[in-house]
Image: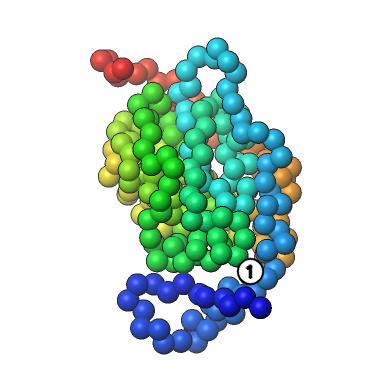
Amino acid sequence: MATIIVPRRKGHDGVKTPAARGMTIAAASLLAITLPFIGQARAQEELYARPTGAPPASALVVFHSRSGATRAMASQIARRLEADMLPIKAKAYPEGFSGWQKAMEDSWNKKPSVIEPEKFDLRPYKLVLIGAPIWWYRPSPPVWTFVEKNDFTGLAVVLFSTFNSGFKQEEIEQFKKLVERQGGRFLDHISIRRGRVYWQKSQAELLEETDKIVEEKMEQWRSVMERPAPIGAD
């Protein structure tokens, strides 16, 4: 049987408190139950691609996804907005136990990730939607690294996420502050519960819920996308 190593925050003295022991049990239980579901939400289709000859997109969907749920949500959002898509790859988090363990450790310790691409020219866009799974109650490390490495000056930003257990609003606020430090204007955070340890939504259910959210937000997002470019802008 594989050994479960629960990630420890920097500076932890290694003493197993009742809370730490509880986390060990919870982590082991979660892994044992959810491993069969990994990949269930993976999109069976190619990522959305804008038609050849279409006018330049004013929105970009950037996303990191490990098991596929956030990928499916991202593709559906891009399809509805006719947006460009940019997948963020992080080789440190492959599918399987070792990738899961590394993902949890880095999230718990709030460590940056090595990602590809690290930098991207965001100047052609007006709206950037950033998608991530929630790991340890916060967006996955790759999207934090992407924001830290890029210039969001003048851009409206929406964070979207998929989760099982939930997220902490204080972590979303920290992400908002990071976006603002990079020059962006944080509009909103939208999220979908993809399931619980004993069940996971089907891809059809995930896409249906994504569509409902997009319908609610479309007017606001379109107003940003159709806003005239500043005088003198490229």
Q: Residues within 10 Å of mark 1 (few under 14, many from 20)?
A: some
Report the residue at 41% width, 87% height from top: 15
Q: Position of residue 199 (x, y in %)?
A: 73, 60
Residue 180 shows in this picture: no
Residue 195 image-quadrant placement: bottom right
Q: Position of residue 21 (x, y in %)?
A: 52, 84
Residue 124 image-quadrant placement: top left
Report the residue at 40% width, 66% height from top: 109
Vertical arrangement, residue 216 with respect to residue 36, above or below: above
Q: Is residue 153 left or right of residue 45?
A: left
Residue at label 1?
Answer: 31
Q: Nearer the viewer, residue 164 or 6?
A: 6
Q: Is residue 151 left or right of residue 7?
A: left
Q: Position of residue 34 (x, y in %)?
A: 67, 64
Q: Nearer the viewer, residue 188 or 205?
A: 205
Specify the amino acid type for callout 1.
Leu
Q: Position of residue 98 (x, y in %)?
A: 56, 64
Kindly state the secondary structure of the residue where label 1 is placed: helix
Residue that extends furthest to the top in the rendered view of this protein: 53
